[in-house]
Image (cartoon, rainbow, N blue to C red):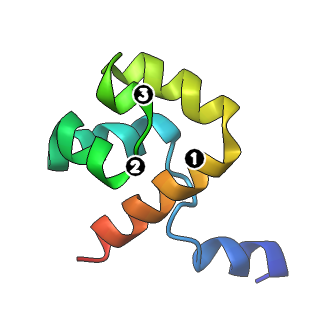
Amino acid sequence: MDQEAQKNKNNPLHGIKLEEIITTLQKAYGWEKLAEKLNVNCFKKDQSIKSSLTFFRKTPWARTKLENIYIRHIQK
């Protein structure tokens, strides 16, 4: 197994699309609870998967926080 494959094997986000992350968390917590966990307008005002995708694709710091919330959620 090469080094890249080994790294991906240990990455819980490998093969998971951003839309899947948002959808999973939204179903688990709802928009209000997500807004408490990560204070961003796409969770507070314009609550949609589409607006969230747009925001997180353009905002690396927020995407990292969202991914960390997702990792904690799936490890429960």
Q: Residue at x 51, y 40 (%)?
A: 18
Residue identifier under label 2 = 38
Q: Position of residue 71 (x, y in %)?
A: 41, 67
Q: Where is 36 relative to 56, above or below?
A: below
Q: Which mark is residue 62?
A: 1
Q: Hey, what amino acid is under mark 3?
A: Asn
State the SS at label 3.
helix
Task: Tell me whether the residue at label 3 lies in contact with that at label 1, contact meaning CB atoms closer than 8 angstroms.
Answer: no
**CA gap, disc 1 to disc 2?**
8 Å
Q: Badge 2, how many Cα within 10 Å: few under 14, some, many 20+?
A: some
* 4 vs 74, nearest the viewer: 74
Q: Quadrant of the C terminus?
A: bottom left
**CA gap, disc 3 to disc 1?**
11 Å
Q: Hey, what amino acid is under mark 2?
A: Leu
Q: How many marks?
A: 3
Q: Residue at x 51, y 27 (%)?
A: 53
Q: Badge 1, how many Cα within 10 Å: few under 14, some, many 20+?
A: some
Q: Position of residue 26 (x, y in %)?
A: 24, 39
State the SS at label 2.
loop
Task: Tell me whether the residue at label 2 lies in contact with that at label 3, contact meaning CB atoms closer than 8 angstroms.
Answer: no
Q: Quadrant of residue 73?
A: bottom left
Q: Quadrant of residue 34?
A: top left
**Between disc 3 and disc 1, whose residue precedes?**
3
Closer to viewer: mark 3 or mark 1: 3
Q: Which mark is residue 25?
A: none
Q: Hey, what amino acid is under mark 1?
A: Ala
**CA gap, disc 2 to disc 3?**
9 Å
Q: Residue at x 58, y 80 (%)?
A: 10
* 4 vs 70, nearest the viewer: 70
